[in-house]
Image: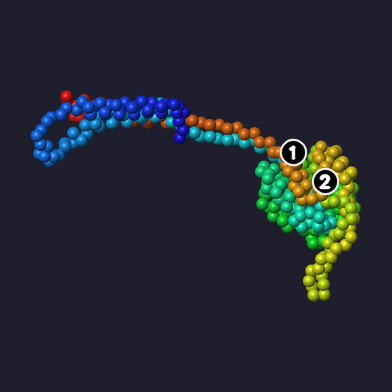
Amino acid sequence: MTYHSLWAFWFLIPLVLILVWTFWNRRKKTPTLQFGSVDVLKSVTPSLRTRLMHLPTILKALALVFAIMALARPQTMNTKIRKNVEGIDIVICLDVSDSMLIEDMKPLNRLEAAKETIKKFIEGRSSDRIGLVVFAGESFTLVPPTLDYQLILQRVGEITSASSAKIKDGTALGVSMANAAGRLKDSQAKSRVMIFMTDGENNSGTIDPETGLEIAKGYGIKVYSIGVGKDGPTRIPVYSRDIFGQKVKTYQPFESTVNEDLLSRMAKDTGGKFYRATNEGALQKVFNDIDNLEKTKIDVNKFTNYTEKFPPYLVIAIVLYLTGLLLGRSWLRRVP
């Protein structure tokens, strides 16, 4: 409960001062009798009327307190908030080819760095449908656009490289772009976004990147393309089994190349942006940037209904004052 007119409580100060002055002044004017000894009077028990002699004044004072509370207008609030949410549909398209196992990004390699960053991005959204597509030499939809963020986070944690998942290795950029675009084509959201992450260039698939780009453009999808990892000679881990069945990791030379021209055109032609992320910190900044650019539009309308609660206080004040006035002029009347 709140009070609309808090200034009314200032009247309590003069009320207290008046009460103090009244009792002090009445004490000074109390008539006295002189006795040689008061021992006899000590055994006299005060009557009920004597004990209640100040009751009329107390009741009138309480009446004024309740009147002041009524003047302060106590109220209860019933607030209703209506949100008009204009969500965004997002499909994250992640390269899981074996080159994403290159260990030049923390916590372990490019793939694990991407997974951790994607998880943080998903945890920061609230009203957007998010889907997940993975690709290597072929493309798969792990999760269609949904608001079930727990499901998406679970599936992100289960992502492995192409060799571990027993799928064709390679980099099918055109196929994956067409797959992701297909997941967004029926979206009713005003903003449809594809976040496309890869560390290579197209070398597989039945759909070329130009066709995939035209499909995305045709559906009005904005593409944020991210080139992951550093270009140049590096080493790619290769796992095998020794004669005892133990997993052994060795390294093979590998030339890492990101097709920046293609990724840049994908972003430019669809109204998105192209980024290079050569370490885990840069990758996180990229997703932070996308998060700021693609904000969900939320219109909040707040309605507050106030209910006045002063009538009971006013009734109590009137009853107390009349009771005090009646007692003061009848049973508890003071005669000089």
Task: List the residue tagged with mark 1.
Answer: 293
Residue 113 at least partly seen: yes
116 up-or-down from 33: above or below:
below
- In the displayed orientation, state which residue is furthest to the bottom: 244
Percent x, y of residue 331: 19, 29
Kindly indicate the quadrant of the structure image that contains residue 325: top left
* Residue placed most toward the observer, 233 or 237: 233
Name which residue lies at 20% across and 35% down. Answer: 51
Q: Which amino acid does label 1 sit on?
A: Leu
Q: Is residue 224 left or right of residue 56?
A: right
Q: How crowded is mark 2: few (under 14 residues within 10 Å), some or many (20 or more)?
A: many
Kindly indicate the quadrant of the structure image that contains residue 109: bottom right
Whichever of labels 2 and 1 marks the residue nearer the N terminus, that label is 2
Q: Residues within 10 Å of mark 1 (few under 14, many from 20)?
A: few
Percent x, y of residue 156: 73, 54
Name which residue lies at 66% across and 52% down. Answer: 150
Kindly indicate the quadrant of the structure image that contains residue 225: top right
Task: List the residue tagged with mark 2.
Answer: 276
Q: What residue type is labelled 2?
A: Arg
* Residue placed most toward the observer, 300 or 98: 98
Percent x, y of residue 27: 23, 29
Q: How is the image coloured?
A: rainbow
227 up-or-down from 50: above or below:
below
Name which residue lies at 83% across and 62% down. Answer: 237
Picture quarter with the C terminus:
top left
Q: In the structure shown, which secondary structural element does the residue marked by tag 2 occupy? A: strand
Percent x, y of residue 173: 86, 49
